[in-house]
Image (cartoon, helix red, strand yellow):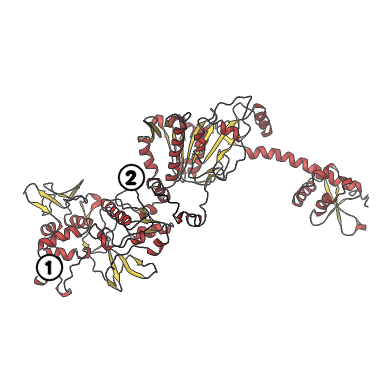
Amino acid sequence: MLVQITNIKRFGNSSKEVAERISSEVPRHIQLSTLIETYPEGIRRGNDFMLGSLRGERGQSLRINIDLNSPWFLSGKDFESGDGVGGISKILKEGRGWSIEETAEYFQDHLPQRFMPAPENIIKPNNPQNFQVTNTTAGFQQPEQKSVKPTIGPGTPFENEYTYTDEHGEVLVTVRKYFDKSETGDLILDSTGKPKKQFRQFMNGRQGIPEPRPLYNIPNILTSDTVIWVEGEKCADALSQLGYVATCTIGGSGMLSENTASKFDFTPLRNKNVILWPDNDAAGKRLAGIVEAQAKEAGAKSTLMLQIPSTQEEKWDAADAIEQEFNVEAFIKSHENKVKKPISLLDDSLLIDKYFVGSAPEQKFLIGDTIPLGVPVVFAAAGDSGKGMMTLDLAMKVASGASMQNSFGGLVAEHGDAIILTAEDDKDEMHRRISRLDPQKYREHYDHKLRILPLPNLGGVFPVMQKIDNSYEMGAEFARVYEQMLTMTRLKLIVIDPLASFVHADVNADPAAGAAFMGMLAQMATETGATVMVNHHMAKIKDDKPIKTPEEARNAIRGTSAIVDGVRAAFAVWPVGETVGKQRCKDLNIPYTRNGVFDGAVVKSNGPANRDFRHFIRNPNTGLLEDRSQDIIAVKFSQTVRNRLELVFQFIQERELSGHPVTKGGNTDGLHEMVRIAPDDDMTAANLRLMNLSEETFKKDVTKLQNTNRIGQYKITRSGPKKFLGVVGGTLHNNEPTID
């Protein structure tokens, strides 16, 4: 043992100093994992790990502190014997019978300054009690197979490899990941059920770490304005696949601490906007805090610490988020308003050729080219028009996964989860409406999730926004619901019905209240990536003064101008006058009913949108306003076509009778030309009205007339191979041509 003692003295002059160094420099999560492996009978209660004694039997007389942030980490007292516990070295001495030399050898790969005895003198730690690994996902009580600490070198098979380079792409160091396995080759799991892993760094084929220690992905960091820091290379690569520039510090929490931060080179973060995404545990948050401090010291333009949703599991990270299809873009955007950046007009990064780089983001729509995705939208309609029914129909079709026409008229372009918060309709009424819209129960097989919250049955309505003193805040209960919305990765639609029930402030009279609420909706849309549609009322419309234009409809929306001005889009529906309503029903051959015929349109949009009028008819079976625009247009178009066919027929007949029949070649070019070259004094009414028709339209019209046996083709021998168009039963048909 003399060789061991001699070599270990590189750490200090005594066993106590060695033990203290192990406690301070070995990552705490590694120490905790070793404690659990040593005592499979231990039970975790909060921040305590309980045993009968350091011999390892089950009990509660010995309590060891396992709070990773506590200054008393891995200390405690045996209340039965009065003996104290202090540090991982003593725990391993009592629990495994290891000497300080054996403990140092066991942890050497996790120490910045390694204990490296000569190979021929290495004494492997004995394990007389044949300790077993504990599956900590079952409360540290379920025994598993014994972990085998692998012997790792350049030729050892590894799971993943990550390369750190300088700004020129020259390799600085290679990091390899290895999984711990049992004696039978099975993976050993950590406290969260993930495989235990180890990392090794190699330089020029040998283990080693460059000084200073570099950041990951340096070439891309230097060319980017914004950089996301994560704890490991796997997370950085996952974000890179989504188009983000991400980095990490080599060795994670095992190498970076307050004491070792000076060994790392953070200068690539100078003048960068740094976003920090910590792992969801105490160690991850502590490490992110160290990186944030170092980034600021290096001259980062700004830093932003992402707050992990409370609903996520322990150790949840960026790679987990992407694997779960978590809305990463919305998650990051939700924090952007929490960082304040000093604005400088002298900052060249704000120049148009630097700030607006690459292709412009594509405008996505929830409904065709009518309702955008990921924006706040006001849907306004007169009372008793069926706003709730229309938004219910929309939500059902968004969740269905099928590209169906919805009650707003367009095709659903984006599918995903949807949420409806309704303050006026209870569960029974919503059930009746759903049954009318979906009698076949297709909802039982939707591709996505639709959650309908009839608040009268769920404890009553809670405010989305409320006024407290002179400020406007999100309601506490809604804030809890909203936090859950942020975890939904496929959320596409949020419906709030109606506005007045969810706002405890006078948005109709107070412009500040209206602006505050609309700002809150905009934040929700940005953070969730969903369209946030709020149902709102229009002023009562008099029968003798029906709305005729989108501008009139916009002005009829209740409240201050801030309500409409504060959203990206607004859609309105309003009743038509009785005369117009009766004519439409007549055209469609359906009975007219009061309050059954409506118009609608996009009345406000900050981007491109279809602003065409929509014509709605109430379905007598479902009560749903259905877009019948195409049917109404078709009726009008059919009449137009009939009128035009008569003009074409009339023109062909007039040419035949005048001695200038229309020539018919392989197409209708003769008709097309004759319409255009007819002399002024020969212009008929038909001629004048056909002037702007295309050759393709003439061709279709002649075909229709031929198929109905009204027009024929006739060959006149003396005129050669030419054919002429004439009326069936006319002069050409009877071989009585008069051709000039």
Q: Nearer the viewer, mark 2 or mark 1?
A: 1
**In the rendering, at what x and y percent does residue 237 appear?**
38, 60
The structure residue drawn at horizontal position 45% and vertical position 39%, both measured from the top left corner, is 519
Q: In this image, 161 relative to 425: left or right?
A: left
Q: In this image, 248 relative to 147: left or right?
A: right
Q: In this image, 287 relative to 535: left or right?
A: left
In front: 83, or 96? 83
Q: Quadrant of the N terminus?
A: bottom left
Q: Secondary structure at mark 1?
A: loop
The answer to whether residue 498 is visible is no
Q: Secondary structure at mark 2?
A: loop
**In the rendering, at what x and y percent does residue 362 appear?**
52, 51
- Amino acid on which disc 1 is placed: Lys
The structure residue drawn at horizontal position 80% and vertical position 57%, both measured from the top left corner, is 666
**In the rendering, at what x and y percent does residue 37 appear?**
19, 57
In front: 315, or 294? 294
Q: Which mark is residue 311?
A: 2
Q: Residues within 10 Å of mark 1 (few under 14, many from 20)?
A: some
Q: Residues within 10 Å of mark 2 (few under 14, many from 20)?
A: few
Q: Which mark is residue 628?
A: none
Q: Residue furthest bottom?
A: 120
Q: Residue furthest left?
A: 81
Location of residue 242 (image quadrant)? bottom left
Query: Which residue position holds label 1?
Result: 9
The answer to whether residue 25 is visible is yes
